Amino acid sequence: MKVRQVSVFVENQPGRLVAMLQALKAKDINIRALSIAEGADFGIVRMILSDPRLGSEALREAGFTVKETTVIQKEVPDRPGGLLETVAPLSEAGINVEYFYAFIDPTPGKADLILKVSDPDRALKVLGE
Amino acid sequence: MIWNPQYETMPRNELQKLQLERLKDVVARVYEKVPFYRQAFQERGLTPDSIRSLADLPKLPFTIKRDFRDNYPTGLLTVPMEQVCRVHASSGTTGKPIIAPYTANDLRMWTEVMARTLTCAGMTKNDVMQNAYGYGLFTGGLGFHYGGERVGATVIPSSTGNTKRQLMLIEDLGTTVLVCTPSYSLILAEAAIEMGVDLKLSKLRLGIMGAEPWSEQMRVEIEAKLPIQAIDIYGLTEVVGPGVCVECPNKCGMHIFEDHFLPEIVDPETGEPLPYGQRGELVITTLTKEAQPVIRFRTRDIVTLDPEPCVCGRTLVRMSKVTGRTDDMLIIRGVNVFPSQIESVLLEVEGVEPHYQIIVDRERHLDDLEIWVEVSEAVFSDEMRKMEGLQKKVKEEMEGTLGIGARIKLVEPKSIARTEGKAKRVVDRREL
């Protein structure tokens, strides 16, 4: 399914990540999944939040630059080969995966995958959703 | 030693008669040939006949850097391009440079004032001059080159950079006169120490330095680290390049070659003329340039003028070191940089004008330019590839426009300090 991911531009300076997390805590926002793409001077923090709209607002109020993106959330089997089986069909269909990250699902034997793809609608079809 | 005593030691009343004659000529020339000037004159009810004495000079309109931009590239020429035999260029306030064209006579005049310059600084035909000013569109390289050849010295066109090779040439070819920016001379001095080269054993004895402002303290440092007399020189592309004025070995102000460049001091706020001795903005009118004369050009440099004859025998007015500027222009590694140029690049690359901050510092005598660019939502992409691509593109376009390299740092909005809602655009940490 499609979900809203919140991306934040964060400078690679001490205190910035903490400030970001404090802004979310202040509004009682829970982070369900998180990934950081880091460069030399800055990073892009990508998060799945309990409330993306409120979370974005809280971060903007705290002075951060924020963007919301549509990504795909897909349940995958939590066993060797589980990820491969899910991603391979996308590759065969010529759909480009820009990035992905995974987090644990409360259901035993399941994990959740977040994918940013070039064509979300076609990707969902290929993934059988 | 005086290259051209007839003009350099001319009694002032004779000099003023000559200046008036030449002023009338140049005024007639631009009135006839340059629509921009004709219009400016007519707006003030002026014609060439309005100039009866030098006291009439302040009636004439000023020329500012923007007038060059508005008439880019050839709108201020008085001759067709076929008569232009050289074009130089310098930084303008936006993406376009200032164009400086020269006819054959202009080049002869420039060579003459450069020969005077080098001789005034103490150079002779027996010297070996190493020219570490940049060759190319910049007026420094070729200006000194032609002057050096005219004086009959041995000229080494080493241009900028390649410090190791510069030191090798100084040692092996017996360089006696080094011409370069003051900060580069210190880079050379330090590189020599690192390489175990003792420049006190070289034949160096004189340095002629300009293209950027430098303090008396810096001169003391240069003369301690290099076995040279360090002489100050000043010039600007809109007027001719280097060769407007230079110190004699008495180092008591820079003699302006007033038979070619008529100087005034004005109040930077009101434009009213100020008397000799008062600090104000230097304004220059070219008296003999053909291709692109300029009338009352506002240099934005703050100086004082002293008309008393010098112990060297020259009667030409002496200009103090530049003590400040009236605009926001920076000189970084000898290159003029305007914040507005930086703005224009950011606007072009990003489609929006983000907040930015210019940080200038000097590390081991080399100027360093870093530009902080605020990542607002309009500019932010979720993809690292795109953000890095953006940084790279800004860096490339910036270097292309400014002519020097800058580090580009993408920062959060919070990082650019704001006082009263206005971001501080330039942080210059150098102590010049």
Image (cartoon, grey):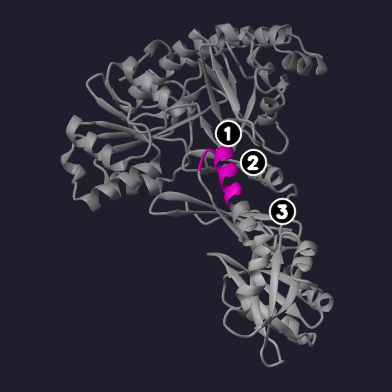
Q: Circle 1: is it few (<14), some (14-19), or many (20+) Cα within 10 Å?
A: many
Residue at the spot 67% in from the left edge and 59% down from the top edge: B374
> Badge 2 is on which residue?
B341
Residue that numbered label 1 is attached to: B91
Which of these two is toward me, A122 or B21? A122
How far is the residue under mark 2 from the one under mark 1?
9 Å
> Dot 3: within a 10 Å radius of its alpha carbon, few (fewer than 14), some, or many (20 or more) residues?
some
Tag 3 near tag 2, CB within 8 Å? no
Q: What amino acid is at disc 3?
A: Pro
Q: Position of residue B119 (x, y in %)?
A: 33, 22
User: Dot 2 lies on which element?
Assistant: helix
Quadrant housing residue B229:
top left
| Main SS class of the magenta portion in the image | helix
* Left or right position of A38 against A30: left
Residue B354 numbered mark, or none: 3
The secondary structure type at the circle numbered 1 is loop
Q: Circle 2: is it few (<14), some (14-19), or many (20+) Cα within 10 Å?
A: some
